[in-house]
Amino acid sequence: MKKTIIIIIYLLSVVLQCKDSLKTIRIGGTIWPGYEPLYMASSLNFFNSNVRMIDFSSASEVLRSFENGNLEIAALTLDEVIYLHSKGYKPKIILIMDISNGADVVLAKPYIKKPSDLIGKKIGVEYTALGAYFFARFLQENNITPEKITLVPSEVDSHESIYLENKVDAVITFEPIKTKLLSKGAVNIFDSSNIPGEIIDVLVTREDIYENNKEEIQNVVNVWHTSLDYIKKDFSGATKFMNSRLKLSEDELKKTYKEIILADKKINEEILSGENPKIKIILEKLYDVMKKNKIITQEINIKNLY
């Protein structure tokens, strides 16, 4: 009888373990050059068979999908991770993907010569995502108060159309839309190089998924670094895969990657490692800006994020 009970307990533990482990890891992101190494990895079958890359038209959709439990891993900016944490979703950073150094931008009509010319004008912003933070920093750096500019809420897949249809005087956007609009006469009046080291993209998962699937998550991290090695060795070959989504020429993509620092192992170690890691300082700064500008209102402990 005792032996039977032990066997039953063992079988139950096996069943529960199977329930916790994931059959498929769904990774979601938007069209952004910093995320392309993972989508390229999927095209080249670098992943184990249980990884599925999902494409979204906006960061807002990625956030909603992660909140609803339809993604195990999401590609987001750090400010979006803080937003998730403030809502109680317990995100855990597993990888630094890239640092934007000019690829996120405020693009304006040619009659807007400088940031102060936007006073009294309209600006398109995806306010539930990075746009909210970027807009706040744009105002802060240029000593403009929020009420002096009219916000036009708009998800990223509409940025090109609302600009070209003259529904806004400027738009907060990023690559590859940046290159497309610049070619049609848009003017860069502010970009992420003006706030260096603040716009960082990361991969995040939920705390429970991290604890129960460490091997699978480590595989995703390893694949990221394998993809970066592939890009370094054969940029032209990698371009063929990445531009199936980005729709940029090889020269345009080269120029874009001069404005985005893809985070290799060394950069990840520099930002995430140590007793007082750089990520802590960066998160504290982001959190302070978001609180001050009422992007979030809840008190959070940023140590839980990494």
Image (cartoon, helix red, strand yellow):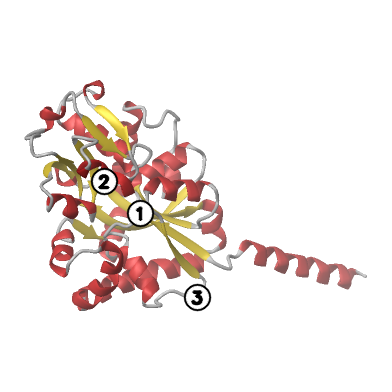
Q: Which residue is mark 2?
A: 161
Return the residue at label 1: 202
Residue wearing tag 3: 49
Tell me residue 127's x, y (percent).
34, 36
Task: Please tell me how crowded label 1 is: few (under 14), some (14-19), or many (20+) other residues with Cα within 10 Å.
Answer: many
Type of amino acid under label 2: Ser
- 234 horizontally vs 21: left or right: left
Q: Residue at x 56, y 54 (%)?
A: 208
Q: Residue placed at 70% from the left, 63% from the top?
A: 16
The answer to whether mark 2 and mark 1 are in CB contact below 8 A is no
Q: Position of residue 281 (x, y in %)?
A: 29, 42
- Categorize mark 2 by other alpha carbons within 10 Å: few (<14), some (14-19), many (20+): few
Seen in the picture, residue 279 relative to 73 is either above or below; the reply is above
Q: Quadrant of the N terminus?
A: bottom right
| Mark 3–mark 2 distance (CA, rounded to whole Å) | 38 Å
Reading the chain from its start, which is encountered first: label 2 or label 1? 2
Amino acid type of disc 1? Answer: Val
User: Label 3 to label 1, Cα distance in Å?
Assistant: 23 Å
Along the line of sight, the residue nearer the viewer: 41 or 203: 41
Q: Is residue 128 left or right of residue 238?
A: right
Q: Nearer the viewer, mark 3 or mark 2?
A: 2
Circle 3/circle 2 CB separation < 8 Å? no
Does label 3 or label 2 sit earlier along the sequence?
A: 3
- How many discs appear? 3
Asked whether 291 or 280 is in front, the reply is 291
Q: Which residue shows up at 63% across the image and 61% down it?
A: 20
Sequence-earlier tag: 3 or 1: 3
Establish if 132 lies above or below 69: above
> What is the quadrant of residue 134 in the picture?
top left
Element marked by disc 1: strand
User: Which dot marks residue 137?
Assistant: none
In the image as oriented, which residue stretches furthest toward the front?
165
